[in-house]
């Protein structure tokens, strides 16, 4: 009887906090709500709450701690379940999924062991090779060891050999080859991706960067990968940074770039049927249209929709979320995102969303070249 009363009390508190999080969200409310779910052993709900909270309050250290705890607990539960299924019926998909969970947990030794076992049992399946390549890339970017980088490229080559049109493998190859200075080889994979999907703005932005850098260097046609990886290790730095992380620019250049984004957002807001438009980078936002201030519910909705879509794609191993449309009685919410950048528009029913999505994609792609946070 006592335990029943305690459980009823917890559920009553849970209902109160859920209602408070919807009506008056704050970091403290989300942390308290997550703690109640932890006490109930519902780690999947703790993860949901922490991610929703971070979408609204990305700078909260308390929510970040809650999110890290929830992720580890949730991953360990899923690993335990997959291990049990794998022991009963070994399947290549299970090896890939289990290795991906270990990778997310940061246990690189377990990733390597799981992938090696999967490759040994199912040598014609590319899944384990792809996860192993991601693990090797993670350690290469962290430690800059030539051996890890070379092994990652070898595994990605295996993936492409087994599945010629594997978008993920070509993207990873295009990035790592660009960052070690193998520009021609990188361009080969990016050109192939452009033929597969001409609408991928992330690929298009990377392609333009590589073409630009090729024009400014004297890169040879024959690039020795072993030499380039050894050079990275000996210098203890990559030849080039990530596409969205250029060297710091002058205040005048930054202001010019931010101004161009502000102008582009204004043009989008001027499209017939558009009510609200926003560009969000981290915790800051530019706003245009019928938006009162930074507390407008539209801004919260844009963040949550983008984060939820990114999370769903990641968990279901569908790739990455770039764009989408949410329909309702209010009309349409068009969202494009990449990393911590989100561009969104609310428009009236019947508005041509294809044009708006194209404009938002161009805006987000342009933001890959802006190095500093946007100031409202």
Image (cartoon, rainbow, N blue to C red):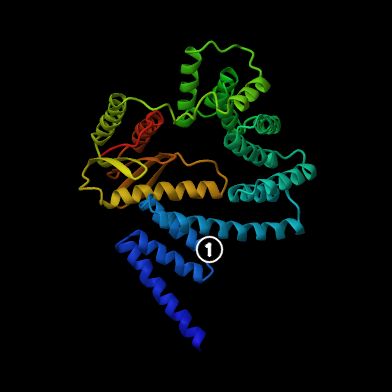
Q: Is residue 274 above or below residue 248?
A: below
What x and y, as percent, mark residue 87?
A: 76, 58
What x and y, as percent, mark residue 255?
A: 28, 28
In the figure, residue 290 lies in which quadrant?
Answer: top left
Q: In the rendered image, which residue does mark 1 sit on?
A: 43
Q: How many marks?
A: 1
Name the residue furthest right.
Answer: 120
User: Which residue does the image show at 59% across and 11% down from the upper left?
Assistant: 220
- Taking the image as shown, residue 214 lies to the left or right of residue 156, namely left
Q: Is residue 349 above or below residue 207?
A: below
In the figure, residue 335 lies in which quadrant?
Answer: top left
**Classed neighbour count for the residue bearing mark 1: other residues with Cα under 10 Å, few (<14), some (14–19), many (≥20):** many
- Taking the image as shown, residue 307 lies to the left or right of residue 219, namely left
Q: Is residue 243 above or below residue 100?
A: above
- Taking the image as shown, residue 294 lies to the left or right of residue 220, namely left
In the figure, residue 84 lies in which quadrant?
Answer: bottom right
Q: Is residue 85 above or below residue 239?
A: below
Is 276 or 304 nearer to us in this picture?
Answer: 304
Q: Secondary structure at mark 1?
A: helix
What x and y, as percent, mark residue 326?
A: 38, 48
Is 132 or 276 nearer to us in this picture?
Answer: 132
């Amino acid at each position: 009887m006592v335990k029943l009363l305690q459980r009823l009390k917890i559920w009553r508190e849970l209902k109160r906090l859920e209602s408070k999080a919807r009506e008056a969200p704050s970091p403290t409310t989300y942390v308290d709500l997550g703690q109640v779910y932890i006490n109930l052993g519902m780690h999947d709900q703790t993860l949901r709450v922490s991610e929703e909270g971070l979408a609204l309050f990305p700078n909260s250290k308390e929510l970040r701690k809650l999110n890290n705890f929830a992720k580890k607990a949730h991953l360990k539960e899923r690993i335990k379940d997959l291990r049990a299924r794998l022991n009963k019926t070994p399947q290549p998909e299970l090896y890939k999924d289990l290795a991906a969970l270990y990778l997310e947990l940061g246990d690189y030794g377990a990733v390597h062991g799981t992938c090696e076992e999967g490759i040994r049992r199912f040598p014609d399946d590319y899944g384990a090779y792809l996860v192993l390549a991601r693990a090797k890339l993670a350690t290469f970017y962290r430690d800059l060891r030539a051996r890890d980088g070379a092994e990652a490229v070898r595994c990605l080559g295996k993936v492409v050999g087994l599945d010629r049109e594997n978008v993920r493998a070509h993207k990873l190859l295009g990035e790592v080859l660009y960052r070690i200075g193998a520009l021609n080889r990188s361009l080969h994979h990016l050109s192939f991706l452009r033929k597969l999907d001409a609408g991928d703005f992330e690929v298009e932005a990377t392609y333009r960067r590589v073409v630009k850098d090729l024009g400014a260097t004297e890169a040879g046609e024959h690039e020795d990968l072993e030499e380039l990886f050894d050079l990275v290790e000996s210098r203890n730095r990559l030849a080039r940074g990530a596409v969205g992380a250029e060297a710091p620019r002058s205040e005048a250049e930054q202001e010019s770039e931010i101004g161009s984004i502000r102008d582009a957002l204004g043009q989008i807001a001027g499209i017939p049927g558009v009510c609200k438009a926003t560009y969000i980078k981290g915790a800051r936002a530019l706003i245009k249209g019928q938006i009162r201030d930074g507390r407008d519910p539209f801004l919260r909705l844009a963040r949550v929709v983008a984060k939820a879509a990114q999370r769903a794609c990641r968990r279901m191993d569908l790739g990455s979320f770039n764009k989408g449309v949410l329909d309702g009685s209010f009309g349409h919410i068009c969202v494009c995102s990449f990393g911590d950048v989100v561009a969104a528009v609310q428009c009236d029913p019947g508005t041509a969303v294809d044009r708006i999505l194209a404009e938002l994609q161009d805006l987000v792609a342009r933001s890959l070249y802006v190095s500093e946070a946007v100031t409202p």
